[in-house]
Image (cartoon, helix red, strand yellow):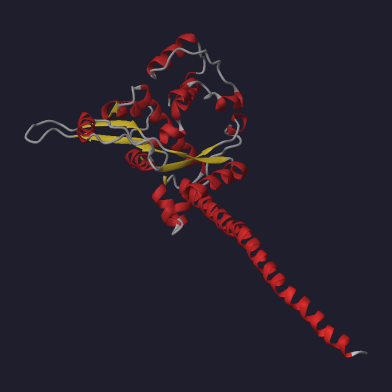
Amino acid sequence: MPPSHRRRRPAEDEEPEEDARPRRRQNRNGSDDELDESGDGMDDNPNQDANNQLAKKLVRYAISCEYSRTPIRRDGIKERVLGNQGRSFRKVFELAQKQLRDVWGMELRELPVREKMSLQEKRQAMKSGSQVKTGSGAYILTSTLPEPYRSASILKPSKVPSEEDESTYAAFYTLVVSLIWLSAGELSEQKLRRYLMRLNADQNVSNEKTDVTMKKMEKHGYVIKKVERPPLGQDGDQMITWHVGPRAKEEIGLDGVMGMVREVYGDWDQDLEKKLRSSLGLKAGPVVAEPSGDAREASSDGDGAEDE
């Protein structure tokens, strides 16, 4: 082979190598750009998985709190669930709500803010000029099941401490809350004791003292006990009044009070409906027929919820 041909071969071989180098560099740069673009998605997936795990943890925490009727507070969620992921509260909360609704038939609902009851508290609030809080930062679990699935034959009381004790407790606090609500939201200690005496519940409720049960209702947020003492230097007895607690407003509500009254009276007519609504400060509404059977549990679907 002539020498000229032998000299061309290395030159021809070098040209593709020189052309390939920048081409490989361009491909490498292009792949880096693709990794950068896809990197955001890859970063989102671990974050999404982490949020899902935190949401499941929040669901477990909420159920454990509700089991003992302990308010699920925002600070508790940040401390016991989120840890150093406090900025993810809203996203984790929304994911937990979806899991609660889709799987458990429940949802977290924020408790109302505690109202200023005494004249002194109202005056202090006016003097301070503080802004009215829109949320309490505390939540409870409420059912999202359709009304037909909320009957006593389906939603039975907890077996801890016992089914009988739990049902008695629920009946008692519903009764006391109804009496307070029917008394314009404030019931004196003397009147409450008088009502309980008529029901033979002034000393004991099931297997515990009535005072112990009332303190438990305070702790759980069904009632609020207000004690007003006479001013310093003045003689007089302290005045004790009972008010509806935040949990009762959310868990029982006006519709629950109306349902219980209709259940107690049995025979229902237009006159009783007017008296009931007048006692609760509600406008006149349609007459609710007397419920029967399991349908009585669903008799609380009146218009009281709109007045919450």
Q: Position of residue 249 (x, y in %)?
A: 41, 32
Q: Residue furthest left?
A: 233
Relative depth, front residue between 241 and 50: 50
For the N terminus, which image quadrant?
Answer: bottom right
Residue at screen point 53% across, 24% down? 301
Give the quadrant of residue 115.
top left
Q: From the viewer's perspective, is 114 left or right of 149?
A: left
Q: Position of residue 275 (x, y in %)?
A: 41, 13
Where 172 falls versus 57 (above or below)? above
Viewer-nearest residue: 306 or 298: 306
Toward the viewer: 82 or 108?
82
Task: Give residue 89's position: percent from left, percent from top.
Answer: 47, 50
**Residue farthest toward the right in the current orientation of the protein:** 1
Is residue 193 in view from this perspective? Answer: yes
Q: Can the viewer see residue 161 in this picture?
A: no
How many numbered badges does the structure rendering display?
A: 0
Give the camera-side residue of 276 and 195.
Answer: 276
- 135 shown above or below 278: below
Residue plotted at (48% across, 18% down):
265
Left or right position of 233 against 188? left
Residue drawn at point x = 78 percent, y = 76 percent: 16
Vertical side of 302 occupied by 145: above or below = below
Residue 32, image x and y in percent?
63, 65
The vertical placement of 27 against 202, above or below, is below
Q: Quadrant of the C terminus?
A: top left
Query: In the shown orientation, is residue 307 left or right of residue 133?
Result: right
